[in-house]
Image (tube, rainbow, N blue to C red):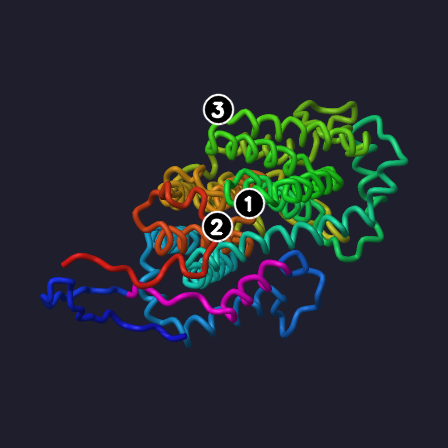
Amino acid sequence: MIDRPIRLDKRTSASGELVAARYILAHSHTTRVERFLLVTSIVFLPLESFFPTVAGMSLSFLLFAVLAAYVVANRPRILGETWCHSVFIAAYAFIGVSAMLEFSSPLSAYDQHIRFAQMIGGALCVAVLCRDRSALTVVVYAYIVMALWASVVLFSTGYGTLQGTTAEDFGEATALREEAFSQATMVTDLNGFAIFCTQGAIVSFALSLSGWLKHLRILLLGISAFCLVASFLPMSRSSAVISLVSFAIILYAHGAKHGKALILVLVLGLGVYAVVPDAVWSRMVYSSERRADGKMEARASLYDTALNRLPEYIAAGVGAGNFQRKWGLEKGFARHKSGSVIAQPAHNSPVQIMINWGILGLGMFLLIVWCVYRSVPLHCGRDGLSLALLGIMVSSGLTLLVTHGFYAKELSFALGMLVGSRRWIWPNGVVSAVEVNQGPSPHSTGLVPTKQ
């Protein structure tokens, strides 16, 4: 289906008068091909590092390239109406300002700018394709499918070892984690797999609160519990915090007055606590204290070093290339990896951005965050689909606080879904009360009659 222009239709009223009724086709419905491309890109996202690269390009990069080629060839008009959204404008400004600051620093390197630009380009393609409830629905369910197969992998490889072993402290738990998943060839990033499972649990729970999915509520809650338990198996503290905060925000958006929702959360939490192996809880601690050998936990050490060096980079940063090649190695961020010494970035995107490009670079990045916040539709707790989108946005945003990958490909889907839904599904910025009991319909958008 190709884009079609605005048209005028003439009709005769009951009184015999000729009335001009204007019909505007804001955008064409998504096709099965478009929805298939979206689902495929999401479901295979965790396998980015598992499959070998093709000419240096990962599987996710190739899938995004297919998305981009399709959008440019088949949806140029919609692309032209989407690229100027406030979120994307703020992203362009961040790229420009941070690039100028990088240019002024020694040992300049622009690989992070390129990755961030690619992430924004992917988000733009997703926004073009997420232009009706049908597309947004299949994307939301794709998150569940992705989380389910990732959870099956984690259960089949690590649950048995963790269930039959105990750990007394953080160090023993970390060693146990490495042993439990040492044979999991598909799991290249334990923390990443944990977050994927967490997002699936969040989406399933959000959909279970929907009025038009009552007949699937038990199934969705079961999926949510299964994925939530799996998210704890890698012993990721970040994933645990993200799940806790995300569930709380979903409940707040849905309305804390709903006693049934609170009961569901209580039952879900007790069930997860009972099934998760006891060894997992031994790693759910964080300490900034120095051990007997004088060393600190790795994450705490990075934060402490970043705080102590704050006067050296707060003004204009030290540059991403300079951090990787010289400054980070000399100022306490050096770490041994695979027989070499590298500069370990801070496990926090805002902190790392400020190290790279100072307070101005951080300010431009926070402008993106503000535009994203302003784009979240009001009353999203009314509709299960918008509530699931809120859960994805919150979990993706919290991920930025525990990783330096502000250019990660998974952010393309979160940003693209939000911009696309705000631009095409909820253009007035409010989730209509009519949608509360309305399920996903392929005909929920299209010809919209307007008065002259």
Earlier residue among tags 1 and 3: 1
Q: Say few, some or many: other residues with alpha carbon within 10 Å of mark 1 (under 14 / 14 to 19 / 20 or more).
A: some
Q: Say few, some or many: other residues with alpha carbon within 10 Å of mark 2 (under 14 / 14 to 19 / 20 or more).
A: some
Q: Are dots 2 and 1 in contact, CB under 8 Å? A: yes
Image coordinates for residue 32, horizontal then vertical, percent = 51, 69
**Residue position marked by numbered label 2 in the rendering:** 439
Image coordinates for residue 382, horizontal then vertical, percent = 43, 38
Looking at the rendered image, the disc whose residue lies closer to the viewer, 2 or 3, is: 2
**Along the line of sight, the residue nearer the viewer: 403 or 301:** 403
Which disc is residue 213 wearing? 1
Would residue 367 appear left or right of 388 to someone viewing this image?
left
Look at the image and give the residue range highlighted in magenta: 25-43
Q: Which quadrant: the C terminus?
A: bottom left
What is the CA distance from the residue labelled 2 to the residue labelled 3? 23 Å
Q: Which secondary structure, mark 1?
A: helix
Would residue 34 appear left or right of 193 to someone viewing this image?
left
